[in-house]
Image: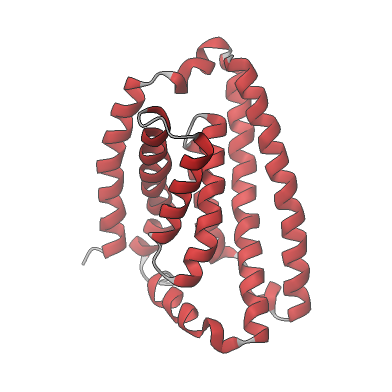
Amino acid sequence: MIDHLFLKYSLYILTFGCIYILLIKKNGRNIQYAENSRRSSLHIMIAAVCVCLLLGYLVQLLVSGILQVIRFINPQLLETYSQWTTDTFYAWDNILRLIAVMLLAPIGEELLFRGILLHLSIRFLHFNRIFSICLTGILFGLCHGQTIQVLYAIPAGILLGLIAEGFHSILPAICFHMAVNTGAYLLPAVLFQTKETAILLTAVSFIFISVCCYVLFCLSDRLNKISG
């Protein structure tokens, strides 16, 4: 039997991918910088993708660290959330579920929220850019449903919007999203065995997240100068 998440996000990609391609054809801004300086823009995009992969993993480390600290303080507070994540995502015996969460979900959700909704709100509805980024970020968070997940999905959605707009492409955002989802599976549990290590990892990850965000800002600024 096909896993329901695998089927859901496969349909997301098929449907929203076609709509996204039609929108991009109507707005050539996404390819202008490549025409101005292909080599420089390609190097910047490769660097942005690498930084976004690292940033996504760090964000997952930060979220996991905060949640683990909460568990040490009040285990009952996250009991429902822990059971929900176990039932929904941690199915190592279901390869289709793993593919759906790690690969298909980031692509499908970025096509919808950053590729279509953000694109439409800014360039067709002419909403303020920051307002549009925040609005799609909030919608992205609310669509996750589970209360705890909504609380960290909203700021992550806003960050994804800033990345997509900064580079005029959803590719770095997809890579960031993939790293976040994959990190949930790959982070070693031994890192969070004590409250002290969880707090330390939370603090360290926050520092490196700040550095990655600054690097992305510099890269996007340079890309925008190339594109004119």
187 over 196 or under it: above or below: above
Residue 157: % across, % down = 50, 51
Residue 93: % across, % down = 38, 72
User: Which is nearer the eye, 202 or 191?
Assistant: 202
Model colouring: secondary structure
Q: Answer with the quarter of the image where residue 26 lies.
A: top left
Residue at left offset 66%, top offset 63%: 62
Residue 211: % across, % down = 75, 45
88 over 110 or under it: above or below: below
Residue 64 visible, this angle: yes
Residue at left offset 62%, top offset 82%: 71
Q: Is 56 on the left-hand or right-hand side of 27?
A: right
Residue at left offset 32%, top offset 28%: 23
Q: Which residue lies furthest to the left in this view?
A: 1
User: Which is nearer the eye, 95 or 21?
Assistant: 21
Residue 4: % across, % down = 26, 64
Residue at left offset 51%, top offset 57%: 154
Assign the C terminus to one quadrant of the image: top right
Q: Answer with the quarter of the image where residue 19 lies.
A: top left
Assign the N terminus to one quadrant of the image: bottom left
96 over 228 or under it: above or below: below
Q: Is 136 on the left-hand or right-hand side of 17?
A: right
Residue 102 visible, this angle: no
Q: Which residue lies furthest to the top in this view?
A: 36
Numbered-mark total: 0
Q: Is 214 on the left-hand or right-hand side of 223?
A: right
